Amino acid sequence: MRSDIWRLYRHILIGGAIILLVCYGAIEFIQSRYESDQIHRYMNSDVELSAQLLSKGVFTASTISQYSRFNWQVLSEPEPLLTPPKIKWLTIDSSESVRVFNEDTLFLEGELKPVEGFSVASLLRYYLHSAALVSAKLETLQSLTYINLTEVNPSAYLTSSMSGIDMIQLNEGTSSILWLDADDSSWLISIELGSAFSLGGAVILIIIISIAALLILIWVELTRLDQKRVHFETVTRQIARGRSSLPQGVVDSSGTLKELAYSFDSMSSHIQRLLKVQREMINAISHELRTPIARLRFGLEALKDDVTEEQEASVSALEIDVEELNTLVDEVLTYGKLEEGSLALNFEQTSIRQLLNGIVDHNQPLLQRFDVRVEVSDDDIVTADAHHLHRALQNLILNASKYANSIIAITFTVDNERWQVDIEDDGPGIPVEDRDKVFIPFQRLDNSRTRASGGYGLGLAIVQRIAFWHGGAVLVDGSELGGAKFSLIWSRSQHQNSLS
């Protein structure tokens, strides 16, 4: 069993490790994309600002190159940029370069310097310290794609007095410039991080997905385990209900319940063998008893001609005993066939009203001292094996007659799913703790239900098996009349396709 438990843990551990590796790779990829995006924003801002400054003809390429990340070369006459410049990135011999077009004219070409890190702060500081007008500086900064320009109160960012241009660190972890212009207005200049791309949100999403994937993996394993548990529970209930043909091969050869499955399958097979031997023995004994019973009948019949009147009463009593013994053998054989399902049931549509009236009329000598009340709904056509349903209802009615004081009530009801026949009496009733025992073969309750009441303890067991093969059940409860109430219930739909 330990190896099977380890198998379950191994699946979870391996699945969890794979999920963690995938998450780590995804986070690394997103981090790389995030850093590449930030580098692109810094480089693009550097190129746009350099192009704006060089297009005015005031600054030289060599001067701008000192503060820019690129070594710039002007390829055409400087002209003011009427629209944002077109930027084309190139990779030549493993070196990065960029070309800038003023509309369709190639204006600048720059080669990336081989230094670490990217920042546009040096170029911005140089430009802000230049002699250009404040309005021109603001216009230039506002034209840059990724530059944010916001007028602010410097006291919110600085604890000391401001000195023209200060570098500050924002909460987002990026360096920004706080600029006090000639008009004493304070401006915060920063690179736009791109709110549409959130590294933190992506990481949280990946963690949530990974946890969900791990939970799904655990749920799948537990679901498989629960399916096997349900299967074992179903088979156990079948055994408890006395099903004679238990399922074979209840084996989970590779699952976590392998040993339990083998033990359960072995137990199931052993129970089937015991039940089979028991049924065969009872059936064999019952069949073998038929011959001596027949000889006893024949002998008693022949003996009647040679006995005196005093002896004739004893012979008649012996005949009654032989008849009871023959009835017992018949009931044992009937129950055995119902138990193993070897009886051929012939389902057909029959009138429950005619069936009940026929039983009451046939047993009138036994029922004449009772007030028998039969109540049947208008829709009295049922699907059943008429012979065995007659046997079950007759057993229930005769059982009620043994214990009723004066009243036997028979009620038939129907709904969309089932038919139900209730048989009640006003006798002593059955204690709650004994109600399940009445369906056990040869089981008799306390001393108040003695052999004087007749029967062999098989009648209700036969009723239960007939109900089972009709897709129903027989229940026992207390009656409003004061005695017991037996309810024979069976399905309306189970045998619709079996009509003959």
Image (cartoon, rainbow, N blue to C red):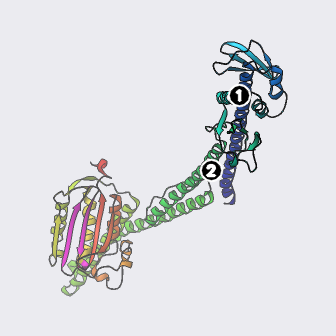
The range drawn in magenta is 402-424
Q: Reading the chain from its start, which is encountered first: label 2 or label 1?
A: 1
* Dominant secondary-structure state across the stretch colored magenta: strand
Secondary structure of residue under mark 2: helix
Q: Which of 282 and 493 is in front in this view?
A: 493
Determine the image quadrant of residue 351.
Answer: bottom left
Is residue 52 at least partly visible in the picture?
yes
Snapshot quadrant of residue 314: bottom left
Depth-wise, is mark 2 or mark 1 nearer the camera?
A: 1
Q: Is 456 or 41 nearer to us in this picture?
A: 41
Question: Where residue 54 sits: x, y (%)?
Answer: 75, 20
Which residue is denoted by mark 1 in the rendering? Answer: 133
Residue 47 x, y percent position in the rendering = 73, 25
Instruction: Name the residue tied to disc 2.
Output: 211
Q: Counting other residues with Cα less than 10 Å from the Cα at mark 1, is it few (<14), some (14-19), or many (20 or more)?
A: few
Q: Secondary structure beneath disc 1?
A: loop
On residue 142, the disc is: none
Mark 2: amino acid: Ile
496 vs 355, left or right, is right
Q: Quadrant of the N terminus?
A: bottom right
Residue 99's place in the image compared with 316, above or below, is above
Q: At x 67% / y 53%, what residue is drawn?
A: 7
Task: Kindly report the distance in space between the C-alpha atoms of the residues bearing marks 2 and 1.
Answer: 57 Å
